[in-house]
Image: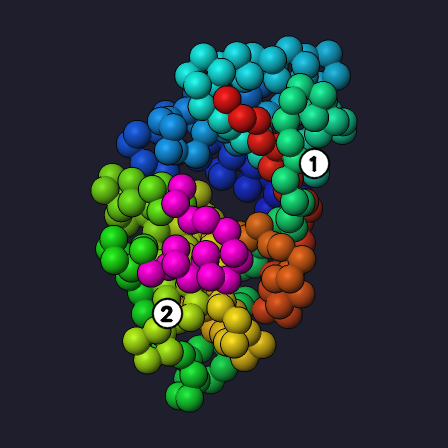
């Protein structure tokens, strides 16, 4: 893979020029910063910036004022190749809190592999695609059980997308009988060449059985059906080794910086 070329394409398609994920969010191009602005339940934040040491602090202050006037918290999603090199330190000085760094990993859609027979083992959980509110509730419940965190905000955002852009994502559940034991989703951004893998979680007792791999391969087939060229993942340390074995390559690191209203 041409890492530099794919990274340039990713920056242009998925950051600078990417459309909002639903009609309630607007993209605002400020020249050296592109931000998304929506309501209190939407994802608000900076998706791209091209700054230097001379203008970074002023640009950060402008975003703080903008979202502060709206009374919403927001995220500045940084990448390891963003400039200036000390952007993260400047954000911390401006009152942001750093989240956990994750690996930006990309694979060509044809790369992820799965067991023969389509990625589901006869003796394992079956994979079911859902695109309704019931399925979203089940997926959020799996996420809460798997990670021990609340999923209310994620539920609200996915329901909003379901209402305004139902074709922009698919939720996949792993079902053991009638019990959901795994969940993940794929997000599509038309015209970008990329499909994003998000929200993968498996409850205790079903980990270590290849289910994560099966869900990745399943979503890769969904991406191929939509004509996507690349799969992109923000991978936690626990997922990165699995993804690497499936053909994903690490292009850098992404770190969220959060600021409360």
- Labelled disc at residue 142: none
Q: Is residue 189 visible?
A: no
Quarter of the figure that contains the N terminus: bottom right
The region drawn magenta spans 138-153
Q: Quadrant of residue 77?
A: top right
Q: Position of residue 38 (x, y in %)?
A: 37, 26
Q: In the picture, residue 58 is in which quadrant?
A: top right
Q: Nearer the viewer, residue 72 or 28?
A: 72
Residue 180, numbered label: 2
Is residue 108 shown left or right of residue 124?
Answer: right
Between residues 248 and 213, which one lies in front from this camera angle?
Answer: 213
Q: Can residue 116 be seen from the camera position used here?
A: yes
Q: Is residue 143 one of those drawn in magenta?
A: yes
Position in image of residue 109 (x %, y %): 49, 61
How crowded pointer 2 is (Cα within 10 Å; few <14, some 14-19, many 20+) is rated as: many
> Which element carries disc 1, helix, strand or loop?
loop
Report whether 122 appears left or right of 45.
left
Q: Is residue 169 magenta?
A: no
Q: Secondary structure under badge 2?
A: strand
Q: Main secondary structure of the magenta part?
A: helix
Where residue 153 sits, quadrant-wise, is: top left
Q: Residue at x 30, y 29 (%)?
A: 24
Residue drawn 67% across the image and 19% down it: 94
The residue carrying pointer 1 sits among few (fewer than 14), some (14 to 19) or many (20 or more) residues within 10 Å by Cα, namely few
Q: Is residue 252 above or below residue 179?
A: above
Question: Of label 1 and label 2, which has the lower sequence position?
Answer: 1
Residue 19 locus on image (x, y percent): 39, 33
Q: Which residue corresponds to mark 1?
A: 81
Tell me how far mark 1 sits from mark 2, CA to CA: 38 Å
Q: Is residue 40 left or right of residue 103?
A: left
């Amino acid at each position: 893979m041409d890492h530099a070329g794919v990274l340039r394409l990713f920056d242009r398609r998925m950051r600078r020029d990417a459309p909002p994920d639903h009609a309630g969010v607007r993209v605002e191009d400020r020249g050296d910063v592109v931000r998304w602005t929506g309501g209190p339940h939407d994802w608000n934040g900076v998706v791209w910036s091209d700054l230097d040491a001379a203008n970074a602090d002023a640009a950060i202050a402008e975003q703080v004022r903008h979202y502060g006037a709206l009374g919403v918290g927001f995220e500045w999603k940084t990448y390891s190749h963003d400039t200036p090199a000390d952007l993260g330190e400047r954000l911390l000085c401006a009152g942001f809190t750093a989240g956990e760094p994750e690996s930006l990993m990309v694979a060509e859609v044809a790369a992820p592999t799965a067991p023969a027979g389509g990625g589901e083992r006869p003796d394992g959980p079956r994979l079911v695609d859902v695109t309704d509110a019931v399925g979203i509730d089940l997926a959020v419940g799996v996420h809460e059980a798997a990670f021990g965190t609340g999923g209310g905000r994620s539920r609200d955002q996915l329901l909003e997308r379901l209402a305004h852009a139902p074709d922009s994502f698919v939720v996949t559940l792993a079902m053991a009988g009638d019990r959901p034991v795994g969940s993940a989703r794929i997000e599509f951004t038309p015209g970008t060449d990329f499909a994003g893998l998000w929200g993968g979680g498996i409850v205790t007792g079903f980990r270590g059985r290849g289910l994560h791999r099966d869900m990745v391969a399943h979503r890769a087939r969904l991406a191929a059906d939509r004509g996507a060229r690349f799969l992109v993942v923000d991978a936690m340390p626990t997922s990165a080794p699995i993804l690497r074995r499936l053909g994903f390559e690490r292009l850098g690191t992404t770190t969220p910086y959060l600021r409360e209203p």
